[in-house]
Amino acid sequence: MIIKCPECGHQVSERAPICPHCGVEISGKITRCSHCGEIYFTSDGVCPSCHQAPAAAPSASARTSQPPSARPESSAPASASSSPSGSGRPSAATQPSSQPSSQPHPEGAAPKRSHAALIASFVFACVVLATLFYFYQRSQRDKEAEDYEFAMRSTDEEVLKSYLNRYGDTSSEHRDSVECRLLALQKGDEEWQNALLSNSRSALQRYIDQHPESVHCQEAADIIDSLDWIAAQKSNSEEALRTYLSQHANGRYIDEATVLIEKLRLTTVQPGEKDMITSLFRKFFQSVSARDETSLVSTMSMVIDNFLGKSNATGNDVVTFLNKFYKDDISKMIWHIDASSYKITKTEVAENEFKYEVTFNARQDVERGAEAEVHTYRINASVTNDGCISSFNLTKLN
């Protein structure tokens, strides 16, 4: 039969050697009260619920000598006068029993075993609570230490403010450190605002140098990257673009800079190209001064797009020009090129084929007998990729 353990109250079989929950002995150690049905330990003596002793079982001789209807109360005469001896003594049936009768404990007296169990449970509960409180406090200390380390490494003001709000009762050493860190970050934010508003490369770079761990460092570097790119674009020079690439290996405008460098390489007159052009026109005017027709024609293309207003001119047209320049009264003519006035633009007309547009000033010194004249001209010409003049025009300036 399943009963309730008198010790812990859990259900257990009455034949179980011990209670599997609290470990108290069960089999042969319990009694069911015949008055109220409560289960209790036999060693307690009385039922803890109704405080009644268990009923004594009748002996075997009494059960056989009495009829079924006999009652213990009717087995003795109503008075002492009915005794056959007339001595006035009570009969043996009315004499008190020599066996002691079981008396219940006084009400309110708690069993010793129940008191011991309650005390043990209370002590155990206190130990458990103390252990739990110890581990809780330890976990709180560990959590505070972790949050402190994280706050001191963080560059986010909100993280530090959150720590101060959460651990108001922590050690003053930790709170002072976090507060100092917060003030430093706030000061850094003020310097960041000043650097940002200045939009100055030097101010932004100074902020990065002074606050290398700031959350604004990357933003400052991005702004510097943009400023340097704008400056390189404005210069429109290969040198400036290559400087940008060397300073910003991971810049946002690397691809654009590379493309622009290639474009400039195709459209920028290189030093060797300029030397070729200046040598070509020096030879041209030296040939004019020396009236060297062969040398003069060698500087020109086979077909000249425009020569002094004439389209598709040839070498003969160039010789005609030379003869017109040297009139009969001219005894001497010398041309001087103003090298500082050169302006050359380069245009790609086909793959690896370029055309150069050239403008410059030249001075003509002419001697007419005893008189000398000086004239200044503006020359506009075109030069092919193979170093020949493909167009030529003169404009007299004085």
Image (tube, rainbow, N blue to C red):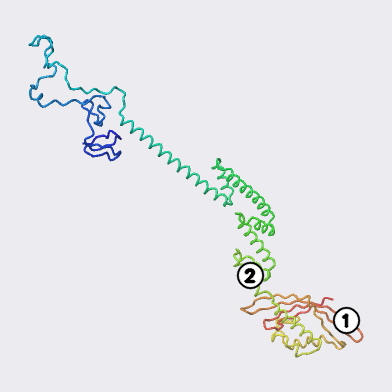
Q: Nearer the viewer, residue 138 or 353?
A: 138
Q: Nearer the viewer, residue 298 or 52?
A: 52
Residue appearing at x 52%, y 47% in the figure: 145
Look at the numbered disc 1 and give the secondary structure of its residue.
strand
Residue appearing at x 73%, y 77% in the figure: 358
In percent of width and height, residue 290 lies at: 81, 88
Q: Residue furthest right?
A: 370
Q: How many marks?
A: 2
Above or below, 132 against 348 in this view is above
Query: Considering the image in quadrants, where does the N terminus appear?
Result: top left
Q: Nearer the viewer, residue 334 or 127?
A: 127
Dot 2 amino acid type = Leu
User: Which comes before the other along the chain, label 2 or label 1?
Assistant: 2
Asked if disc 2 and disc 1 are in contact, CB closer than 8 Å, the reply is no
Numbered disc in front, either 2 or 1: 2
Above or below, 233 against 220 in this view is below
Q: Along the horizontal axis of the image, is 206 left or right of 135?
A: right
In percent of width and height, residue 368 lies at: 89, 85
Dot 1 amino acid type = Glu
Residue appearing at x 85%, y 79% in the figure: 375
Question: What residue did someone put label 1 on?
Answer: 373
Question: What residue did someone put label 2 on?
Answer: 260
Residue appearing at x 53%, y 48% in the figure: 147
